[in-house]
Image: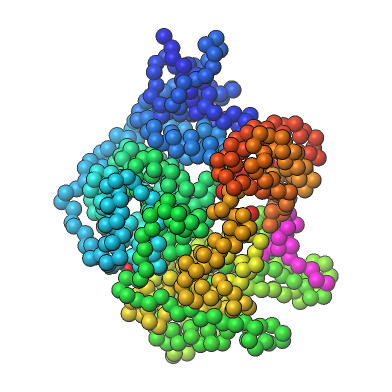
Amino acid sequence: MTVRIRVAVETPQHTGLGAPLSYESERELAPGTLVHVPLGRREVTGVVWPGEPEDAADVVLKPVSRVLSALPPLPRAWCELVEFTAAYYQRGVGEVALSVLPPELRKLDDEQVANRIAKLHRKWPQPDPQAARPQTPPLSPEQSAALDRLAQLNSDSAPTALLHGVTGSGKTEVYLRAAEQALAAGKQALVLVPEINLTPQLEARFAERFVGRSIVSLHSGLTPAQRLRNWLAAHLGLADLVLGTRLAVFASMPRLGLIVVDEEHDPSYKQQEGARYSARDLAVYRGKREGAPVLLGSATPSLETWHRANEGRYVRLSLSSRIGGGALPRVRLVDMNLLPKTRGVTTAMAPPLVAAIQERIARGEQSLVFLNRRGYAPVLHCGDCAWKSGCPHCSAWRVFHKLDRTLRCHHCGFTERVPRACPECGNLDIAPIGRGTERLEEQLAGMLQTPDGSAARIARIDADSTRLKGTLEAQLGAVHAGDVDVLVGTQMVTKGHDFRRITLVAAVNPDSSLFSSDFRAPERLFALLMQAAGRAGRDAAQAERSEMWVQTWYPTHPLYAALRRHDFEAFAQSQAKEREMAGLPPYAHLAMLRADAKTVEAARGFLQAAAEVASELPGADAVMVYPPVPLHVARVADVERMQMLVESSSRVALQRFLSLWMPTLHELRLQRKAPEQRVLRWAVDVDPLSI
Ligand code: ADP
Ligand code: ZN
Ligand code: ZN
């Protein structure tokens, strides 16, 4: 007697099959069970999926090859999360399911999985009652109020709450206490952070508090074996706390009782390839589905979250002052138009700012100077013939890295040694234009010294200086230990770190995003600057003299006016008004269709054909399809990239439309066989971050 089952497997995208496939099994298999099944000529891993196969009774089905019965089935809620993700972001169910499971699960056989599980059980029995009781600080009145409100709401039904707290207001303490409550109720807690770099720090804070409890992390920096082990610990219910980056939102947790999304506004929560999901949004869905409260924490919430809190769909919890009553840093705008020029060039660092940093060095305090551009200079230039260091494969400049004397493309990676002379005209005098962190570090070293006349200690933290494993930790350690006077870095250093000795933060050149065509650029800039400011004066004793300096050519810009007052609300309100008038999120819903091809014509042709198909679909009148345009950096690694925006005032209408449109696009791609029409790939991005 055989039964028919559905199995979610990874099918090649071009087949257009997103749904689970049907197989035959010798016995009933619980949904969520891992199996191996034949697919074409291969044998692949799949997940037994809830629901009945729809095939007619006379269709002959292939049998399941093997059942991985050592692994307890994935919970029903997990399957639903995957199914929701696949439907909402327009991907295959199997594709999503397999891409969020630890890759090792596909390689191991039943016995190996059983061994791993047995080993984990030996390592974790029970929480240790003998463990030392950790020190917990008394809560501030605002922290208490937020936690009380959360507990009160939670006794009714699990709320989604925006924890809006200024930097240094003790949001992490609220997460810790909320997690404590969840654990006390026998539940598991999931804590998401935007950056891998922030996980060790957070893990240390949780480990210190939850002595004797098992905490695991999940992020892409783990080895495959570590990732499997930690994932299993969560799935088996052995881990009480799971900390991780966006992929951790898919951790299988049978007793989920709390989800925290720290820095919920951060763009890193959006996956940018494959299923382009937002871990923040999925966390909200998941919390609702599993009856777990969701805490979205930020000093500068995304406008989407802010809007939902205003509508009353999310509960707003506020922490308006810093722990210890410390002030937020005073914001000082430097008008670059008024600075003296040397040979027509404005100095990189305003003299009063240099003096202010110098003062800090004399007092033994630290400064953080940030510039969102790594390398020495963004471009090399020949004054005689106007040659510039373009990338031959991309529509972008290659960046000059002085330390290893290379020109590097930050888009495709193409790297060459710096030419001695202009490749076009032989001029020996080719010069860097503009400035990156390497050059800033060099310039600051030339300007700053300690009171006894020795060189100031300057450290640089960016993707280049931290490429080797362990270097970031070492550099951060030096900053915390006070072995650094000035920290230079990209936005990497502005996020999350609890620096105690920094009393000055400076943004050297933040203007570029003020006039970007991307509608979210101002929101991102404001968040970045507020977050950077939040690194200063975290020790209340020093807060009074802490400062945030911003060098700008547009000192009267409203964004800077709001920053000066630390007034997120005013900023959010003016942004919201602009978005409403322009018909942009959160007042409209967007999807972006992208196409990559060897030629602009092929990419555009595909999108235009897609638009024609779209106009004939039912429900087409509820969406607006815009003309195709090139991406901001149109060509990368010799591939032309075009995109086409789809907009609707109704999320449901957009979803309905996309689900009809997607299958036709799979067909469309197959029809366009001629070499000059061929697209390399296409993808839809639902709720794109930037347009
Ligand atoms: P945020 O995440 O809001 O920027 P943190 O949670 O990092 O702020 O808190 C800032 C600092 O205040 C940390 O050093 C933290 O240990 C400390 N802190 C938080 N809550 C309290 C409290 N109730 N009493 C004393 N110190 C606290
Ligand atoms: Zn030249
Ligand atoms: Zn390139």
User: Which residue occupies 27% across, 67% down?
Assistant: 140
Residue 388 lies in the magenta stretch = yes
Question: Camera-side residue: 608 or 656?
Answer: 656
Query: Residue lying farthest bottom?
Result: 452
The secondary structure that most of the magenta stretch takes on is loop
Numbered range of the magenta stretch: 385-401
Q: Nearer the viewer, residue 321 or 316?
A: 316
User: Where in the figure is residue 523, as x and y percent of width and height?
Assistant: 54, 63
Q: Is residue 53 magenta?
A: no
Q: Is residue 244 above or below residue 174?
A: above
On the image, the x and y values in percent for residue 466 come to 50, 62
The quarter in which the C terminus is drawn is bottom right
Ligand 1, by image quadrant, is bottom left
Q: Nearer the viewer, residue 632 or 35?
A: 632
Asked if residue 266 is positioned above or below residue 106 in the image, the reply reads: below
Q: Does residue 349 show up?
A: no
Q: Is residue 316 above or below residue 330?
A: above
Residue at 55% x, 71% y is 559
Could you say which quadrant of the image residue 169 lies in?
A: bottom left
Question: Is residue 10 visible from the viewing direction of this image?
Answer: yes
Q: Is residue 610 left or right of residue 290?
A: right
Quadrant of res 485 = bottom left
Residue 268 vs 513, above or below: the answer is above
* Residue at screen point 54% across, 61% down: 576
Residue at image coords 44%, 14%: 3
500 horizontally vs 657: left or right:
left
In this picture the colour scheme is rainbow
Residue 415, given in percent of the width and then of the height, sits at 67, 59
Q: Position of residue 1 (x, y in %)?
A: 41, 9
